[in-house]
Amino acid sequence: MKFATAGLAALLALCAQSAVASDGPLALNHVWSRLADVNGEYGSVESAEFDPASTRIATGTKFDNTVRVFRVSDGFELWSRTVPQEIERVAWSRDGTRVMSVSEDGLLRVFDAEAGGLIARHQHQNGIDGLTVSHDGRFVVSGQERVEGEGVLRVFDGGANMIVAALPFPGTVNEVDFSLDDRMLAAVGDYTARIYRTDSDDPDNWVLAHEWTLPAEAGPYGRDNIYINTKFSPDGRYLAVGGAFGFVYLFDTSSGELLRTLQKSVEKTETVAWTSDGNYLLVAGNGMTIDFFRTADILNVDYRNSEQVPFALRVPVTDALEYMDFNATGSLLTTAHQDGTVQLWTFMSDDPTINDRQHRSVRREQDAAAREGGRYVD
């Protein structure tokens, strides 16, 4: 389903007010949309990530095979670099000086974030689907597609200058994610989801903590039912895993228990994300909405099946999503779409005290600066 200009305007107006069973002003407000794959409807943006300072967004595309960097404030394109094959993921180094991409030609590329010059490249044995950077900036992890049934997690130093470890994985690695405290690494793909304990400084000593396997031949979906994407909750207590046919799985990272299986539609779940307070899980993909679920509702045993778990918010979008990413503060969301666009949204939470707390924080900083400068503070 595609929208003409008039339809898009109506849709964005609906986005600003769209809410289901929300207690407060929970909303996504659309800011801008830019073409990141020049093929438009015939293109697709596979990945979009904020830099650590929330001033730039990097994208990677499926059909024009291009890394682009946009300015957050107005969507201005700062630079672009085209590679030979489809780009699956992009990521930023934690100091914001490097942009990394992984693609179907089996290359992890490292670009200078300021001007886009190529700094380094690392060849893999097959296409690469997953890419993540630890929050302390020490490690970059790529996830390779399977070769003779086995994938690989490759661990690089924080600038992706050199490989430091390789961990086997039973199938394609579709996505990887570090917990906020960097003590866990999740890897998902094909029929396997895993959590590794990453307490050791040596990645060769990272320990497999949990593994969840989908039955390849069981159920009505058979071998087409796979794990696709994953994200840790901010407190690290839960791991959300999205899959084919609209499935979303919520696991307890301590016990390994499967807490809930959601299936609100049969449309593929391409991406999941958590709000910064962990109160909401966002789910999106081949459907035409971004769906918000309260974590408390997902965990509520009174809802006996996924059909009973309510939507906290449903936001219509212009086309199917491939990826979404919150900025560091959780106030902005960027989305990558199959219509070739990257989009920016402001997230309006249902916490009515946010502005007041922000005001008090700024006032304290201003008063402290005034005292230090010898100025009068009332």
Image (cartoon, grey):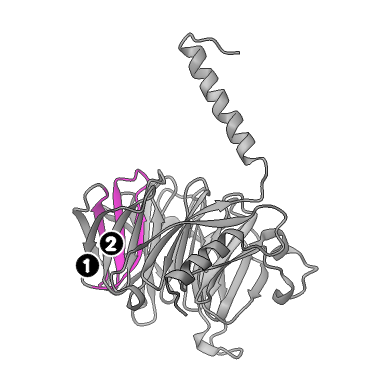
Disc 2 residue crowd, few under 14, some 14–19, many 20+, Cα 10 Å: many
When asked about the image quadrant of residue 291, the answer is: bottom right
Q: Tell me if label 2 and label 1 are in contact, CB under 8 Å.
A: yes
Amino acid type at image mark 1? Val
Amino acid type at image mark 2? Val
Residue sitting nearer the eye, 287 or 224 = 287
Q: CA distance from mark 2 to mark 1?
A: 8 Å
Does the stretch in magenta take in 106? Answer: yes
In-image side of 115 versus 270 (left or right): left
Residue for point 21% across, 49% down: 115
Viewer can see residue 15 = yes
Residue for point 60% across, 61% down: 281
Q: Which residue appears farthest toward the front when viewing the image?
A: 6
Magenta stretch, residue numbers: 85-113
Does the stretch in magenta take in 340? Answer: no
Horizontal and vertical percent position of residue 302: 80, 68
When asked about the image quadrant of residue 363, the answer is: top right
Does residue 168 sit above or below 69 in this rendering? below
Please identify the quadrant where the C terminus is shown.
top right
Q: Which residue appears farthest toward the right when viewing the image?
A: 302
In-image side of 76 versus 355 (left or right): left
| Dot 2 or dot 1, earlier in sequence | 2
In-image side of 77 versus 343 (left or right): left
Horizontal and vertical percent position of residue 34: 36, 61
Viewer can see residue 131 = no
Main secondary structure along the magenta-highlighted residues: strand
Question: In the rendered image, which residue does mark 2 sit on?
Answer: 67
Residue for point 50% across, 15% down: 370
Horizontal and vertical percent position of residue 40: 33, 73
Does residue 226 sit above or below 325 in this rendering? below
Question: In the rendered image, which residue does mark 1 sit on?
Answer: 83
